[in-house]
Amino acid sequence: MHRVVPELIVENYRAGRYRGEFPAVGMFLDLSGFSTMTDALMQHGQHGAEVLASLMRGVFDPLVKTILAYGGKIVSFMGDGILVFFPITDDAGDAALRALASAWIVQQNLLERSMQQTVYGRFVFSIKIGLSLGPVSWGILRSENGGQATYYFRGPVVDDSTAAEKEASAGEILLSGKLHDVFGELVRTRPSGTFYRFDAFHVDLPRPVPLQLPPVDLEVSKVFMPEDVILRDARGEFRQIVNLFMRFPDLPDERLRTFMRLAFELKKRYGGLITRLDFGDKGCNLLMLWGAPVAYENDIVRALNFILDLQEDVDFPVTAGVTYYIAHAGYLGSELCEDYTCYGWGVNLASRFMMTAPEG
């Protein structure tokens, strides 16, 4: 079975906790090169999809294992980006050092694998990372009958780590000011705008810890993702996908719950796959997909009716971008932690349309 729901969410849902807050070191990683690779390999049908899945697994397996081994909680694969939290229990310095150690090891591993040769050509990847310190709030938003749910993470640590990643160049790790202050003389840095570029450690790296993950909880997981997604064997395939990216104001928790209940009701009528709510460099946004894992002849009509009805039923502006494009529908990550999503230029283009469209 696929582990497509973060353990942090599974544990809290099982315990009947649907919102909370904790201090953490946040890490946002951006991997570039995958959209170009996806576009190139989709020209080669199912074998291209198999090559792509193999390449992705080769890149993500060591990355995910390293992050988990240093105590990180991967909570989101957002296209080319990955959001991770290192919860702070007693010592912020310990969490900070574990986060930075994992970021540096991930960066070094990818540098060694930055060029991948395939039967269809050579592909180049790069990574940049932002790290920050602060509170993170989370929530589980359920449908009216509780049969479906999604989740979110937001707060200063999300905003600051994504902002640091935005300012970083390929191959760089940038630290927020608060996190930089925690390290003191333990690391060597230099100013980079309002952030600090990490250059070297002045201390031994912490040791990784053995991974101990519980079995996948199917009953909880299928509340968040379709059961077929959790159980299927195939790694991925190229499909025609309708990508609906929408953004809206940063709503307080209760209004966000009302909004998502409406989205779940419309989903009953029009179908589609709700991924999750994201808060970051694009503000508050939601990605929905039609065409995977289930496709219908009228997916375009379904998606357009969904967004038009949604805009009509809320009292705040919802701005959207919609594309219809071939994408790779499959799993992103490793067997230890992954997500089911679609990636390719169609998703990126829908995101750009959403960000550049007039409000509403």
Image: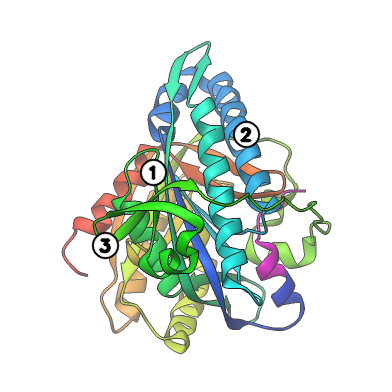
Q: Which residue is mark 2?
A: 57
Q: Please tell me which residue is depicted at 38% across the width and 43% down the height of the picture.
A: 172
**Callouts 2 and 3 close, C-beta under 8 Å:** no
Residue furthest to the bottom: 254
- The secondary structure that most of the magenta stretch takes on is loop
Q: Count residues near mark 2 (Cα–Cα under 10 Å), then give few for <14, some for 14-19, many for 20+.
A: some
Percent position of residue 88, x then y: 61, 73
Q: Amino acid at mark 1?
A: Glu
Q: Label 1 to label 3, Cα distance in Å?
A: 15 Å
Q: Amino acid at mark 2?
A: Arg
User: Is residue 309 a member of the stretch shown in magenta?
Assistant: no
Q: Regarding mark 3 in the picture, which secondary structure is present there?
A: loop
**Residue type at mark 3?**
Thr
Q: Position of residue 28 (x, y in %)?
A: 46, 55
Residue sitting nearer the eye, 110 or 340: 110
Pointer 3 residue: 194
Q: Nearer the viewer, residue 240 or 70?
A: 70
The verdict on residue 9 being magenta is: yes
Q: Which stretch did the figure color magenta?
A: 1-10
Give the residue pinned by disc 1. Answer: 172
Label 2 to label 1, Cα distance in Å?
23 Å
Name the residue rendered at 59%, 83% in the picture.
Answer: 20
- The quarter of the picture where residue 65 lies is top right
Task: Check the image and name the residue furthest to the top.
Answer: 119
